[in-house]
Image (cartoon, helix red, strand yellow):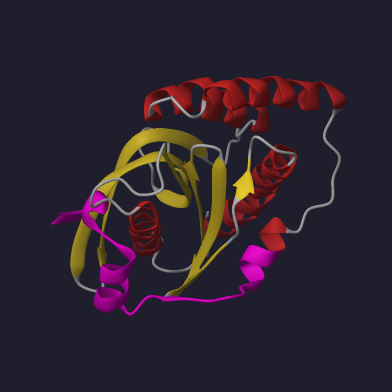
């Protein structure tokens, strides 16, 4: 069984016929946002942004997640009776006859003690590419595993964070789309928050449909 961290984008394309698209309605819809952020939340985001700006260039991955990503996600507040936020959980599945497995930094999924039907996967890194690892490849194979667990009935959402940069993805069938980078040390931090906030409604709707 090949673990997530050993997959690259090239291997994904060759093995599973996965293709990237320039435009996906699901991604466009997710990233299309028009809402205001409460003043108190905006102030808290600015506070987190200052910490990120001061430290991001020398944090390790654990420092990045504990000192910025985790408190940032907490502001979004993924509290729901329909799904839970899981951290560093293992998911496994069969993708086109090949068993794949690995740990995901953060999953939004139905299930109580363990993830059952994953809807969203997030990874964090401090570098875009380190050694033989491929952050995008690792995220996509975990999203394909989530897709297999869900019997391919849902669009799977994902994101990966490299330092100050956030990319968002959608996967449907064997095609995925990826956003341009959003920079958390700039005004993009408010857009990132709105995107993650909108995800709550998207997942609530999917969770209702799969009950």
Q: Is residue 32 above or below residue 107?
A: below
**Image position, residue 7 (x, y; %):** 25, 59
Specify start and end residues of the magenta stretch as a single range.
1-28
**Image position, residue 211 (x, y; %):** 53, 54
Residue 154: tell me if it is visible: no
Name the side, left or right, on which 74 lies relative to 129: right
**Which residue sits at x=32%, y=75%?**
13
- Location of the N terminus (image quadrant): bottom left
**Which residue sits at x=35%, y=64%?**
148
Q: Nearer the viewer, residue 95 or 45?
A: 45
**Which residue sits at x=51%, y=20%?**
67
Q: Is residue 8 magenta?
A: yes
**Image position, residue 43 (x, y; %):** 79, 22
**Image position, residue 139 (x, y; %):** 39, 54
Name the side, left or right, on which 132 lies relative to 22: left
Name the side, left or right, on which 59 lies relative to 205: left
Q: Is residue 71 above or below residue 21?
A: above
Q: Nearer the viewer, residue 66 or 57?
A: 57
Count all numbered tags in the image, as a single digit: 0
**Which residue sits at x=48%, y=29%?**
57
Q: Is residue 69 magenta?
A: no
Residue 69: tell me if it is visible: yes
Give the quarter of the image for residue 188. Answer: top right
């Amino acid at each position: 069984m090949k673990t997530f961290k050993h997959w690259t984008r090239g291997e994904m394309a060759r093995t599973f016929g996965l293709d990237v698209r320039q435009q996906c309605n699901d991604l466009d819809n997710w990233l299309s946002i028009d809402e205001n952020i409460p003043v108190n939340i905006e102030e808290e985001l600015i506070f987190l942004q200052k910490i990120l700006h001061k430290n991001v260039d020398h944090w390790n991955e654990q420092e990045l997640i504990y000192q910025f990503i985790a408190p940032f996600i907490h502001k979004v507040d993924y509290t729901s009776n329909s799904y839970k936020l899981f951290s560093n959980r293992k998911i496994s599945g069969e993708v086109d006859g090949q068993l794949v497995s690995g740990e995901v930094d953060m999953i939004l999924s139905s299930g109580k003690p363990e993830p059952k039907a994953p809807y969203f996967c997030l990874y964090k890194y401090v570098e875009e590419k380190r050694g033989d690892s491929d952050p995008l490849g690792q995220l996509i194979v975990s999203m394909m595993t989530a897709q297999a667990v869900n019997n391919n009935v849902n669009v799977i959402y994902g994101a990966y964070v490299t330092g100050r940069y956030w990319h968002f993805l959608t996967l449907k069938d064997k095609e995925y789309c990826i956003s341009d980078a959003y920079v958390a040390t700039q005004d993009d931090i408010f857009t990132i928050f709105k995107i993650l906030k909108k995800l709550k409604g998207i997942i609530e709707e999917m969770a209702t449909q799969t009950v």
